């Protein structure tokens, strides 16, 4: 890096920094200060610096429960996306031309449909008289419809559907970069295809797995539309709770505290995850 | 260590023959090069020996055992790749130990064997480094150590020197051959670089369009090329077209269009007649200003003169066409462009082949 050139390089970053400052940093600071305000149903928001909102959040098991649920859903969605996305990404590296273009379109399809349309599609499919439950009952797998709508299962299904493309693309990018001679080298050294995958391909795709799972996890933690439609007020997640506090209870300070804790929690988990993976057995992969 | 036999091996890609009924035997401890231009089938042949590709016909035997159907991980071969293919996420020691680990060698036995392999390539101090911290030449040696530590029966080298710079390449030629001799391993070396093949091999198999066009020790390949293709691919050669007018005692005579007679060795028997070609290596021709006693001589005029330092390259126009001549720079005066000269050479430096043998 040429040190003389750096002021000019900084100039290039200025528009983006300006944008982030105005539309991200300032609102975040406003939310932070808002979260210390008080609120009463009669008099509304009251300025001041109080920890009431945080005390309420961290002592009431109801709110803690919703945080735990959101975390649980996000972890399950991340694992499902990884399990579904890895083979798909691997397959994508093995095909070419038209087949690849077609598969890529299928992979990306959830992102091409509007969130509301897609989610209401699942709403219809997952209902007690929906296609899925009718099939389950007809096949005799269960006497009564399985509770899919307004359940964590429904939210997990809906989120996995829309987030799997992010996982596929991340892993695909890292698989694409690998040198095919490495697997061949492993094979001549006596590794069967499974060992060659576990020792060579998998560790070398760790950066893709890491990027994909961070994307999927953070987006699950903050997802709103999918859990709102498929879970609603019966299976609340943190984002839905924030929405209710702001727009229904009009308790902006508490909503702000919830939002802030969600952001901090997600960031912390992601940072720890990064650290653990990057310092692990295959740390050299990240250099 | 073992004998490698390829028996009428066939490989097709999309219906076209890439390797056509190829047979080759490589003896225990022998170093054989597969030499040819890109697309000649040499890499495909190597891939079939390693087991990455299945032949469409024929048989491959290592140490007398048929391995044609075996996957690569069940054949006992070591391979060195063009780009080295070291595992970037493992240290040098882990790279070298990989094959031993896959073979379930105990940890106590792995360490001394890795050390021995690193000593063999003279890089014991790099054990804890990662491949990216090594130079190209060092990576190359680690790749060799990794391939040899498993004590394979056959060593396969896929253009292993082509990514090194010129000076290092020449050093590695000698070093690689030295290691191969010390270990005594049967080796197949794939290259498109004729100088490498000549310098390193016990035997060269020249490939063209999926078949072996000539096979023999480097001297025989260079001095007695069977076809114009071989002569042209391995070193430069002058080709003069003409017609045979008979032969006896291993020597034949070719008449060039203006009545000039060229005598030379006939290797493919002496039965052939009709159109033929005379092949003469540029360095076997002597350029002089006056006629000198010689079996073949031809007057001409210097058209180009290129000074190469150790060598001087002349292009001389003669009645038989333009001929290349390479002389040692042994001091004295150089011929200059436009100068009238006489080219002369011996019958033993001339090879006569039938015209249709352009393979």
Image (cartoon, grey):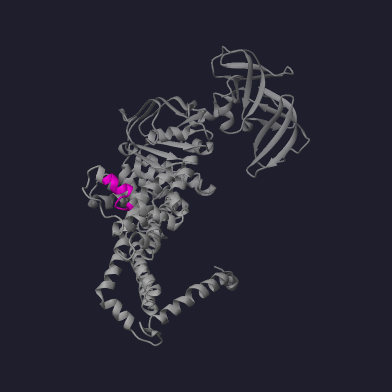
Q: Range of the magenta residues?
A: A126-136
Give the image location of residue B136, x and y in percent.
47, 52
Q: Can residue B119 be seen in this view?
A: no
Vertical position of residue B175 compared to residue B201: above or below: below
View extreme (bottom): residue: A48
Q: Dividing the picture into quarters, in which one does residue A268 lie? A: bottom left
Residue B208 is left or right of residue A270, and the answer is: right
The quarter of the rendered structure image containing the C terminus of chain A is bottom left
Give the image location of residue A131, x and y in percent.
33, 47
> Residue, x 59% and y 30% (percent of image)?
B232
Residue B19 is left or right of residue B114, and the answer is: right
Q: Can residue B338 be seen in this view?
A: yes
Vertical position of residue B335 compared to residue A281: above or below: above
Q: Nearer the viewer, residue B138 or B45?
A: B45
Vertical position of residue A206 compared to residue B47: above or below: below
Q: Dividing the picture into quarters, in which one does residue A221 lie? A: bottom left
């Amino acid at each position: 890096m040429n040190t003389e050139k750096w002021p000019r390089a900084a100039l290039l970053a200025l528009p983006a920094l300006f944008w982030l400052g105005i539309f991200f940093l300032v609102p975040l600071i406003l939310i932070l200060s808002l979260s210390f305000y008080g609120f009463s149903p009669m008099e509304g928001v009251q300025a001041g610096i109080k920890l009431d909102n945080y005390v309420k959040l961290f002592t009431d098991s109801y709110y803690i429960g919703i945080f735990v649920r959101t975390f649980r859903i996000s972890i399950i969605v991340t694992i499902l996306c990884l399990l579904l996305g890895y083979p798909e990404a691997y397959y994508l590296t093995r095909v070419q031309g038209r087949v690849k273009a077609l598969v890529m379109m299928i992979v990306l399809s959830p992102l091409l449909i509007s969130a509301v349309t897609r989610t209401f599609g699942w709403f219809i499919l997952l209902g007690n008289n929906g296609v899925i439950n009718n099939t389950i009952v007809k096949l005799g797998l269960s006497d009564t419809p399985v509770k899919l709508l307004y359940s964590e299962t429904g939210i997990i299904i809906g989120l996995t559907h829309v987030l799997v493309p992010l996982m596929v693309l991340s892993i695909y990018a890292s698989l694409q970069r690998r040198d095919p001679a490495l697997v061949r080298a492993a094979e001549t050294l006596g590794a069967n295809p499974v060992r060659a995958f576990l020792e060579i391909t998998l560790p070398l795709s760790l950066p893709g797995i890491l990027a994909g799972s961070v994307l999927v996890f953070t987006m699950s933690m903050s997802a709103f539309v999918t859990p709102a439609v498929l879970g609603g007020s019966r299976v609340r997640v943190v984002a839905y709770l924030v929405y209710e506090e702001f727009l229904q209870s009009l308790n902006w300070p508490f909503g702000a505290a919830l939002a802030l804790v969600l952001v901090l929690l997600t960031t912390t988990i992601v940072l720890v995850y990064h650290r653990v993976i990057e310092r692990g057995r295959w740390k050299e992969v990240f250099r | 260590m073992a004998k490698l036999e390829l028996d009428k091996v066939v490989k097709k890609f999309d219906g076209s023959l890439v390797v056509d009924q190829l047979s080759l035997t490589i003896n225990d401890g022998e170093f054989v090069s597969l030499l040819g231009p890109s697309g000649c089938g040499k890499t495909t042949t190597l891939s079939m020996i390693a087991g990455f590709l299945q032949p469409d016909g024929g048989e491959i035997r290592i140490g007398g055992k048929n391995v044609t159907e075996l996957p690569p991980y069940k054949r006992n071969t070591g391979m060195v790749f063009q780009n080295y293919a070291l595992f970037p996420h493992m240290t040098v020691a882990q790279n070298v130990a990989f094959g031993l680990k896959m073979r379930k060698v105990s940890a106590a036995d792995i360490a001394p064997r890795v050390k021995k392999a690193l000593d063999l390539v003279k890089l014991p101090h790099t054990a804890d480094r990662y491949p990216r911290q090594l130079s190209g030449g060092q990576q190359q040696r680690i790749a060799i150590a990794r391939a040899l530590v498993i004590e394979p029966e056959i060593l396969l080298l896929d253009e292993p020197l082509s990514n090194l710079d010129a000076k290092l390449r020449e050093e590695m030629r000698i070093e690689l051959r030295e290691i191969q001799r010390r270990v005594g391993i049967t080796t197949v070396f794939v290259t498109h670089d004729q100088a490498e093949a000549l310098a390193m091999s016990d035997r060269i198999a020249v490939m063209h369009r999926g078949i072996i066009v000539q096979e023999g020790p480097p001297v025989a390949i260079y001095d007695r090329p069977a076809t114009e293709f071989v002569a042209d691919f391995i070193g430069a050669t002058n080709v003069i077209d003409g017609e045979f007018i008979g032969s006896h005692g291993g020597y034949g005579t070719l008449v060039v269009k203006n009545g000039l007679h060229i005598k030379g060795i006939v290797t493919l028997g002496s039965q052939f007649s009709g159109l033929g070609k005379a092949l003469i290596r540029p360095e076997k021709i002597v350029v002089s200003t006056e006629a000198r006693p010689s079996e073949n001589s031809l007057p001409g005029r210097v058209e180009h003169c290129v000074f190469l330092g150790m060598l001087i390259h002349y292009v001389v126009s003669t009645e038989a066409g333009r001929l290349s001549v390479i002389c040692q720079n042994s001091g004295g005066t150089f011929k200059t462009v436009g100068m009238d000269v006489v080219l002369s050479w011996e019958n033993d430096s001339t090879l006569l082949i039938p015209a249709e043998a352009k393979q």
